[in-house]
Image (spheres, helix red, strand yellow):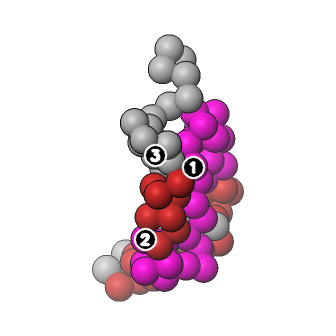
Amino acid sequence: MCLTVSSNRLVKTRTNKLRSLKESSDIEYVDVENIRERVGACRKYCAGRGWYVIDATRRSIEETAAAILSLYKEKPMGETLFTERAKNK
């Protein structure tokens, strides 16, 4: 299972975090292009392994948990949400 958020949302979250810590926001940590690349790479990595990807950008914690539980209930016995499709990759 892979939880993701939109790049723009992550930039805002990180910028606010730096602001609250009174740190400079002129760093790679909040660079939108860097974040887009990393979020895209994460999604691609998870999709390549057959993992479920849930975008939590506009979901509350409760909605995200409900989505996870719903997927968990749909899985056949013996499989987990974290199992790769092909174990020999």
Q: Is 49 rendered above or below residue 65? A: above
Residue that badge 2 annotates: 65
Instruction: Check disc 2 and report its element: helix, strand or loop.
Output: helix
Give the left or right position of residue 1, taking residue 33 as reference: left
Q: Residues within 10 Å of mark 3 (few under 14, many from 20)?
A: some
Give the left or right position of residue 19, taking residue 40 as reference: left
Q: Is 2 rendered above or below residue 83? A: below
Whether tag 2 and tag 1 are in contact, CB under 8 A, the answer is: no
Q: Nearer the viewer, residue 11 or 72?
A: 72
Q: Nearer the viewer, residue 41 or 22?
A: 41
Query: Of the residues under marks 2 and 3, which one precedes in the sequence?
Result: 2
Instruction: Check disc 3 and report its element: helix, strand or loop.
Output: loop
Q: Residue at x 60, y 79 (%)?
A: 58
Where residue 19 sits in the image (x, y, percent)? 41, 83
Residue segment shown in magenta: 39-65
Where residue 25 sits in the image (x, y, percent)? 49, 72
Q: Quadrant of the C terminus?
A: top right
What's under tag 2, amino acid-wise?
A: Ala
Q: Residues within 10 Å of mark 2 (few under 14, many from 20)?
A: few
Where residue 1 sits in the image (x, y, percent)? 48, 49
Query: Of the residues under marks 2 and 1, which one precedes in the sequence?
Result: 1
Cα–Cα gap, marks 2 and 3 = 13 Å
Q: Residue at x 57, y 60 (%)?
A: 54
Cα–Cα gap, marks 2 and 1 = 14 Å
Q: Which mark is residue 52?
A: 1
Residue that badge 3 annotates: 81
- Residue placed farthest to the top in the image? 88
Q: Which mark is residue 27?
A: none
- Residue placed farthest to the bottom in the image? 20
Where residue 27 sits in the image (x, y, percent)? 50, 62
Total labels drawn: 3
